[in-house]
Amino acid sequence: MLASVAGLSVFGLAKAAPVQAAEEKEVNNVTMQDDVPLFSGSTKLGNMIFIAGKGAHTAPFEIKAHTEIVLKELEQELKKAGSSMEKVLKVNVYLNDIADYKGMNEVYKGRFGKKPPVRTTVAVAKGGVPGDSLVEMDCIAYV
């Protein structure tokens, strides 16, 4: 990890970024639990948008169907925030079973345009993805 202190970096002198006034974050689709905010479907700060994990909590319980549902939910949330699949920078994919990796990729490929985002894919530990989904995805994009 590279650090920068007072305009100095491990590579020598660096121009420090100007300090900007704190912006208010915008949250959408807040999930409540016992009348207390639990998490947001998306959070926007400046031109960055962070989309919460989306899962498929319905039949058919097949990886390709679940991947399609999840990608459509991500796309809808991005559009609501004024972004798109082509503006996604990072995707995290959580599989209930790593054996579903190939099937998930078959549906995933090409969905983010010609310049796909970076991606991390992991199989979750014992207990699986919450809500009986075979896959969950979250992402970071710009507007």
Image: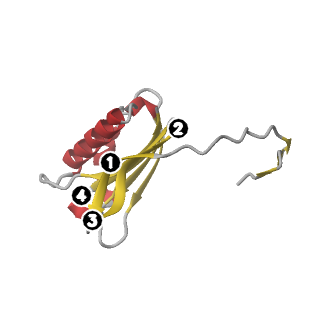
Secondary structure under tag 1 reads: helix
Viewer-nearest of labels 1 and 2? 2
Residue 82, x across and y down, in percent? 39, 31
Considering only vertical position in the picture, is 78 above or below 63?
above
Q: Disc 3 to disc 1, how far (Cα)?
A: 40 Å
Viewer-nearest of labels 3 and 4? 3
Disc 1 marks which residue? 102
Considering only vertical position in the picture, is 13 above or below 52?
above
Disc 2 marks which residue? 46
Task: Give the amino acid type for the residue marked by disc 3 in the picture.
Answer: Asp
Q: Disc 2 to disc 3, how far (Cα)?
A: 28 Å
Disc 4 marks which residue? 133
Viewer-nearest of labels 4 and 1? 4
Q: Earlier in the sequence, mark 3 or mark 4?
A: 3
- The answer to whether marks 2 and 3 mark residues whose Cβ atoms lie closer than 8 Å is no
Viewer-nearest of labels 2 and 4? 2
Disc 3 marks which residue? 35
Task: Give the amino acid type for the residue marked by disc 2 in the picture.
Answer: Gly
Q: Earlier in the sequence, mark 2 or mark 3?
A: 3
Secondary structure under tag 3 reads: loop
